[in-house]
Image (cartoon, rainbow, N blue to C red):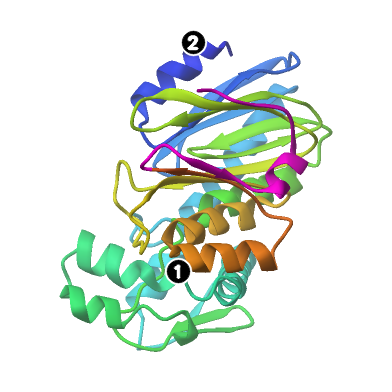
Amino acid sequence: MDHFIYYYMIRLLPFLFIIVFQGYGLSVEKIFYLMGTYSTIDLDNPDDIRRAYKYLRKLENKMSTYLAESEVSLINRYAGIKPVRVSEEIAEVIVEALKISEKTYGYFDITVGAYTINYRRKGLLEKKEALKLVNYKDVVVNGDKVFLKKKGMAIDLGGIGKGYALEKVYEYLNIERGFITIGGDMKIWGMKRSIAILDPLKESIIALFVNRGDLCISTSGNYHQDHIRTQNRNIIQVTVLYRNCTHADAYATALFAMPEDKIKKFLKENKDVGVFILYKDKKVYVNPAFFSYCEKFKKVE
């Protein structure tokens, strides 16, 4: 797909602030609506595109809190009442999310659903009540059963689900090369692409680079939906480069939510996480790990 069409997608989708300009001629590319956003699937074989789409749709049907009978919706419905039996994928993503919560000092927390779903979307709780219920330590996973300890709790996989889906579909496809995006998250493997990071407020390019190898990219910000609770109002957006998309997605969410001292602490402890942070005063921070994942980096003034 040529870059003008990608720019048109950006205009339609204000929360996607990565543009891919060019690749090395994969034969087929399709755009789908998945997980509340647009997804690009660019693979050699049309059959693989169909396989990828069906698999991603299956994961969405399990994770979406907009579907009343999804596994996550059932977990939330029976919060404080009883455990819910779930599939291997849902148990896996929740366990991984809880590990990441520990690693990010609790700034990444899937139980934010009490706030984002039960307070903001459904109006079932008062704000203070909802905030008191946000605590990943009250999630119990026992084999294939998941239990939320308190009534009113809710799981929201919005900060990790797209990255997890990308990582799982990559494993499922088991092919040599491909490029798949879901909103502001993308997986590139077996090829190189020219990538641009945009200033979301001006829709202008602020940096360009080429991926050095297989790569996951995730961008988080509140410029459109105000869906991340943050203590750092000076940050506009965070872009993370990493080898695993589940982690890239969750880390981008967590870093956006963290105060500055916690960001520094996290990056010091996790030197393999690449970050590009854009601040409101137009300053940027790019750490050494970011450069290790890319080449031909250029900051656009």
Mark positioned earlier in the residue sequence (2 or 1): 2
* Residue where numbered disc 1 is placed: 110
Choose top left, top right, bottom left or bottom right for residue 116.
bottom left
| Magenta highlight on residue 287 | yes
Choose top left, top right, bottom left or bottom right for residue 91.
bottom right
Residue found 28% across the figure and 64% down from its top: 117
Q: Position of residue 31 (x, y in %)?
A: 51, 25
Question: In the rendered view of the protein, which quadrant contains the N terminus?
Answer: top right
Q: SS at mark 1?
A: helix
- Name the foreground residue: 171 vs 301: 301
Label 2 to label 1: alpha-carbon separation:
36 Å
Q: Residue 253, which numbered label?
A: none
- Name the foreground residue: 114 vs 173: 114
- Amino acid type at circle 1 is Ile
The range drawn in magenta is: 280-301
Q: Position of residue 280 (x, y in %)?
A: 36, 42
Q: Is residue 285 left or right of residue 43?
A: left
Q: SS at mark 2?
A: helix
| Magenta highlight on residue 73 | no
Q: Position of residue 230 (x, y in %)?
A: 36, 61
Query: Counting other residues with Cα less than 10 Å from the Cα at mark 1, is it few (<14), some (14-19), or many (20 or more)?
Result: many
- Amino acid type at circle 2 is Phe
Q: Vertical placement of 68 versus 126: above or below? A: above
Q: Vertical placement of 45 versus 123: above or below? A: above
Q: Are dots 2 and 1 in contact, CB under 8 Å? A: no
- Name the foreground residue: 96 vs 51: 96
Regarding residue 87, the answer to whether it shows in the image is no
Residue found 65% across the figure and 29% down from its top: 49
Query: Counting other residues with Cα less than 10 Å from the Cα at mark 2, is it few (<14), some (14-19), or many (20 or more)?
Result: few
* Residue where numbered disc 2 is placed: 4
Regarding residue 153, the answer to whether it shows in the image is yes
